[in-house]
Image: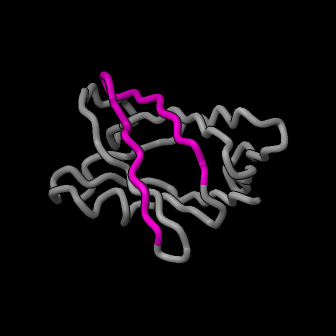
Amino acid sequence: MIFSDMIFVCLYGFDRPDSIIKPDFSDISCPAGAILICTAELRSHDGSVIPLTDTFRMPLRSRDGRERFVSVPFSFGLATFSYTMNESGLWSINQDAINSGLPAEKHMAMKEFQIYVRI
C-alpha cells in the first residue's frame, strides 16, 4: 500500500546556465559540479499536503552502481533541498529506491527522473 505521493513540484534548476531542465522533467542535464535545487511535497491520495515534519535520506543511484544519499528535510509536508552533482554519469531517483529503507506503511509513490551529468 502506498502511504503518500512525493511530488517534485519544481526543480529550480542548477547554478550553471548551461544546464537543461524541461518542465516535465523528461530531460535533465548539467555539467559536473552544478548544484541541483529542488522542492517536493508529500501529498495524500486526495491531493492535500500531508503535514509531516521529518528528514529522510533520498537515494540517488547511477547506472554503474554508485549510490549517494541526499538529505531531504520536510517541514509540514514541504521540502527544499540541494545537491552538488560532482560525478558524471546517468543518475536517477525512483520509487523503488526511495521506499527501499522505509516500512511498508510509509511507502511513497513518485515519478522516476534521470539526471545526465556531463564532463
Colour pattern of the rendering: one colour
Between 61 and 12, the one lying in front of the other is 61
Q: Which corner quadrant holds the N terminus?
A: bottom left
Secondary structure, magenta segment, majority class: strand
Residue in the picture at 46% in, 61% down: 94
Left or right: 51, with 68 as reference point: left
Q: Is residue 68 magenta?
A: yes
Residue in the picture at 60% in, 49% down: 85
| In the depicted structure, whether residue 41 falls above or below residue 94 | above
Between 103 and 72, the one lying in front of the other is 72
Q: Position of residue 61 (x, y in %)?
A: 47, 64
Q: Which residues are magenta?
A: 66-86
| In the depicted structure, whether residue 107 falls above or below residue 54 | below
In the orientation shown, which residue stands out farthest toward the right? 18
Q: Quadrant of residue 43?
A: top left
Q: Is residue 35 magenta?
A: no
Q: Which corner quadrant holds the C terminus?
A: bottom right
Residue in the picture at 43% in, 64% down: 67
In the orientation shown, which residue stands out farthest toward the top? 76
Q: Position of residue 30 (x, y in %)?
A: 73, 50
Q: Position of residue 104 (x, y in %)?
A: 17, 59
Q: Quadrant of residue 4?
A: top left
